[in-house]
């Protein structure tokens, strides 16, 4: 999945960008009080997308 599409999904669900790192962007779900890192690659593996969604406690796209 494309990174920009995944980030649009995160924002639509209610997650916010916490900070930018060197190789990752850190997103936070303030409602569930959970944090996860999204890699800065154009393509993100489907397994990694599911893992990030599980960490943030949101539904997968």
Image (spheres, rainbow, N blue to C red):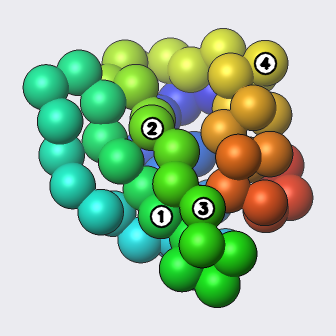
Mark 4 or 1, nearer chain start: 1
Q: Say if 58 sits above or below 21 in the image.
A: below
Tag in front: 4 or 1:
1
Tag in front: 2 or 4:
2
Q: Say if 48 sits above or below 52 in the image.
A: above
Residue topped by disc 1: 28
The reply to whether callout 1 and callout 2 are in contact (CB within 8 Å) is: no
Q: Secondary structure beneath disc 2?
A: strand
Measured Cα–Cα span from mark 2 to mark 4 = 14 Å
Q: Secondary structure beneath disc 1?
A: strand
Residue topped by disc 3: 34
Residue topped by disc 4: 47
Measured Cα–Cα span from mark 1 to mark 2 = 9 Å
Q: Residue at x 52, y 45 (%)?
A: 36
Q: Residue at x 75, y 32 (%)?
A: 51
Residue topped by disc 2: 37
Residue 22 screen position, x and y as percent: 13, 26
Mark 1 or 2, nearer chain start: 1
The reply to whether callout 2 and callout 4 are in contact (CB within 8 Å) is: no
> Where on the picture, by quarter, is residue 25?
top left
């Amino acid at each position: 999945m494309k990174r920009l599409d995944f980030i649009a999904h995160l924002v639509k669900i209610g997650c916010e960008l916490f900070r930018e790192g060197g190789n990752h962007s850190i997103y936070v779900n303030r409602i569930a009080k959970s944090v996860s890192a999204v890699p800065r690659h154009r393509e993100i593996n489907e397994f990694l997308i599911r893992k990030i969604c599980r960490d943030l406690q949101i539904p997968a796209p």
